[in-house]
Amino acid sequence: MGLSAGADRSKKEKGDPAFLQYIKNKKMKQKNGDYVTEGKLRNTYGLDTEAIEKLFPVPDYDVPVYRKDGTRQKAWKRHTVQMILSTQRAKKEIRRGKREKRLRQAEHLNELQDFLGSYSLDDYIEKGKQIKRRFYLHVGETNSGKTYDSIMRMAQCSSGTYLAPLRLLALEMFEKLNDLGCPCDLVTGEEEERTEGAAFVSSTIELCDFSMQYDIAVIDEAQMIADPYRGANWTKAICLVNAPEVHICMAPEAENIVTEMIRDMEQEYETVRHQRLAPLIFSGECTGMDEIERGDCVIAFTRRNVLDIAAGLERRGMKTSVIYGALPPRSRREEVRRFTEGESQVVVATDAIGMGISLPIKRIIFSTVTKFDGTQRRKLTFSEIKQIAGRAGRYGIYDEGYVLTMDDPGRVKAALETPSYQIRRLYIPFPQETLSSGYTLKGLLEGWRTRPGNRAFRRENMEEAEFLYKTLGREYPKDSIRLIYGLITCSVDIKNGELVGYWKRCAESIIGGRVIPEPQFDCDDLEGCELQYRAYDIYHQLVSYTGQTDRSVEEKEKICELIKELMKEKGELQRKCSRCGRPLPAGYPFGICERCYRFRE
């Protein structure tokens, strides 16, 4: 599969004349001083063939320059080029060339946008009309039994697929279906577990197999259809999942837009409304950690704050469980088990807890109502507050759920009392069929980003894929476009430079036809273990391109065991002052305490 580097080596081994001449060019460059080729005049200065012939009529043939294919190209010594380009005539040609280049690029982009404009929501609606289905819309607030009722119905069928927003939720339903006597497989981007004789599959929604036909399908948390990065997966699943009976679980704000889609597909549907069995009550302000009780869940929005709060509670003698995004799913499941079975008294979690994770929580306590969303620090939306707060109360354990906050009680109270606004737009997925259109991948991604949507839909946000494409740092032949697309759509935390660097090494190895390197991050502390685990997630996603043995499963199990041991001493995870060693408060932004700062030398 090798491109560039791998091909160069093979040519060298065979003594390819064109490659040897290419190497000779590099030596000539050192001997004769630098030179400028015709290609460089085009790409760097925007000169076309006509301008080059006007300005540089006679090439410097005493500087023999060859392309990799062995053909000779025109070249001039750099000092000659610099002298000619300093003239007014040359500057005028450069301005004209750049202006025409911009016009050509704009024309090409318009043409590309027109091409991509043919892919719209109507295409998915038309495809959805071809599949005869009956939809059941389960509408209700968090913790109202929507998913439970759908899964109970699935257990009565012969085959089915459950589509989850999170791999932890996919894992929970995988276990539940197997416990109900429905042999079920687990499929997420990071892991797979196969069950003998399985007729059911629990997966993250991105991995829905549209080629399979099931008796029943359950699509969970459909309000995610409005998410710029992932919402397109819900649009595609609702339109194309192949099952005569489809159950869609959603918050009330998604009801109108999902109903409209189903009507447009001319399908039958029935709306099932769910009410919370444990009422939700706003209980005002929590003044400090001394008020935390057994059965509480404290919400923070960074990994560091979660661990600091948990460590502070542990030092007070209160056993805690922690849940946050970077914690491996199996480790999160262990933390959930400890709280559910009473081994820990309090949960400290990020907003990851707001979607589907069932826990016996009496009170939700917001430590803050602001979060950094990757771009800016902002207040939580009312929908986000409701989603998280809804985890309070568990029918049969707590008859009522309570919500408190340490920050901005007025906003939390208003969020719980204000009806949800209906979602007005959904997202459609990037059309992978365009990869065979003849356009470059760079052009397709740019055209997709710049093509405007309309009042009904927006286009899936592909910024992360574009970032990874730019990280590779070069163009690749059109015949490798599907490979490159597969690499750049790998699930990678692009905010983590170490993970992006590891992904790039893996991608370059695949492109060059080499074995993927296994991650080598230190596992001396909790953060290192989490980084190594997430790197093995990347390894697992990419190893299928090489045919080498996937060693991620056993390695991740070892990491989870290390994390389990580290989690036993949560009191030691709190940050301490680098000078005096005193514990620092949760959310404290500096490395030394105020006392040491005041009395520093």
Image (cartoon, grey):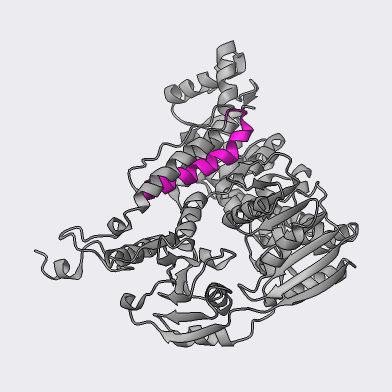
| Residue 228 x, y percent position in the rendering | 63, 64
Q: Can residue 454 be seen in this view?
A: no
Q: In which quarter of the image is residue 367?
A: bottom left
Q: Which residue is drawn at 46% across and 53% down?
A: 327
Say which of 490 and 413 sits in front: 413
| Left or right side of 456 for 97 | left
Magenta stretch secondary structure, dominant: helix
Q: Is residue 113 visible?
A: yes
| Residue 419 x, y percent position in the rendering | 63, 85
Which residue range is magenta in the image?
Answer: 526-549
Say which of 390 and 420 sits in front: 390
**73 part of magenta stretch:** no
Determine whether 41 is above or below 256 in the image.
above
| Residue 535 x, y percent position in the rendering | 48, 43
| Residue 378 x, y percent position in the rendering | 47, 74
Determine whether 339 is above or below 386 in the image.
above
